[in-house]
Amino acid sequence: MSVGCGTIRRVSSRPAAAQRLSDLARLRRVRDRIDREYARPLDVEALARGVNMSAGHLSRQFRIAYGESPYGYLMTRRIERAMALLRRGDRSVTEVCFEVGCSSLGTFSTRFTELVGMPPSVYRRAAVGATEGMPSCVAKQVTRPVRNREAPAASRT
């Protein structure tokens, strides 16, 4: 801030629009990294350091840009991949859990059930062969978990 002739005005080294574009580019890099490295241990602090942002700022801006937190986005990617692996039918739920980067079978099962609407073991039995013969791009859309299924029915309108 600088003071001149009794008025206070904001002095910025960058116009707001340029800063917003820069932030969006950094958020895209974070999202792309989550998409690539979903099976690795990722935390918000490490993601934020990678784009020179604070963890809090990253979380707030990510939610504004993509409608969910970085952690929520990561878990959605992990569950999507888990669904594909479970549909194949050649791996156990435990193997799938660890393959997609989850370290706790309980947390994985809870989150899977919240997003998909059924436990992974039930999904595995029901979905084996369900997308057989379907192009992978169509199967991905049809089987994509729906965000906020975990929200109470009364709050959905």
Image (cartoon, helix red, strand yellow):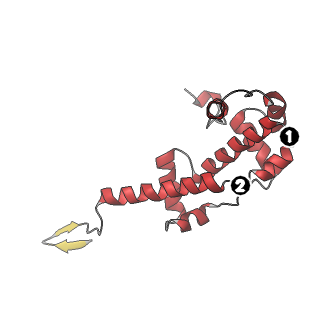
Identified at 75% across, 37% down, the residue is 113
Find residue 72 and name its label.
none
Nearer-the-camera pick, 17 or 138: 138
Task: Inspect the image, locate mark 1, and give the three-letter code of the amino acid beneath it.
Answer: Asp
Left or right of residue 86, residue 60 in this image:
left
Residue 12 in sight here: yes
Nearer-the-camera pick, 141 or 5: 141
The number of discs equals 2
Which residue is the site of mark 1? 90
Q: Quadrant of the N terminus?
A: bottom left
Q: Where is 6 relative to 117, above or below?
A: below
| 1 vs 2, front mark | 1
Q: Residues within 10 Å of mark 1 (few under 14, many from 20)?
A: few
Q: How crowded is mark 2: few (under 14 residues within 10 Å), some or many (20 or more)?
A: some
Which percent across, then down, holds residue 53? 49, 66
Identified at 20% across, 73% down, the residue is 3
Which percent across, then down, holds residue 136? 66, 34
Farthest residue to the left: give it: 5
Q: Where is 80 relative to 56, above or below?
A: above
Left or right of residue 134, residue 26 in this image:
left
Tag 1 secondary structure:
loop
Which residue is the site of mark 2? 39
**Picture quadrant where residue 153 is located:** top right
Identified at 23% across, 73% down, the residue is 2
Identified at 47% across, 54% down, the residue is 61
Left or right of residue 24, residue 156 in this image:
right
Task: Inspect the image, locate mark 2, and give the three-letter code of the amino acid beneath it.
Answer: Ala
Residue 119 in sight here: no
Which percent across, then down, holds residue 46? 60, 66
Tag 2 secondary structure:
loop
For marks 1 and 2, the one nearer the N-term is 2
Nearer-the-camera pick, 91 or 58: 91
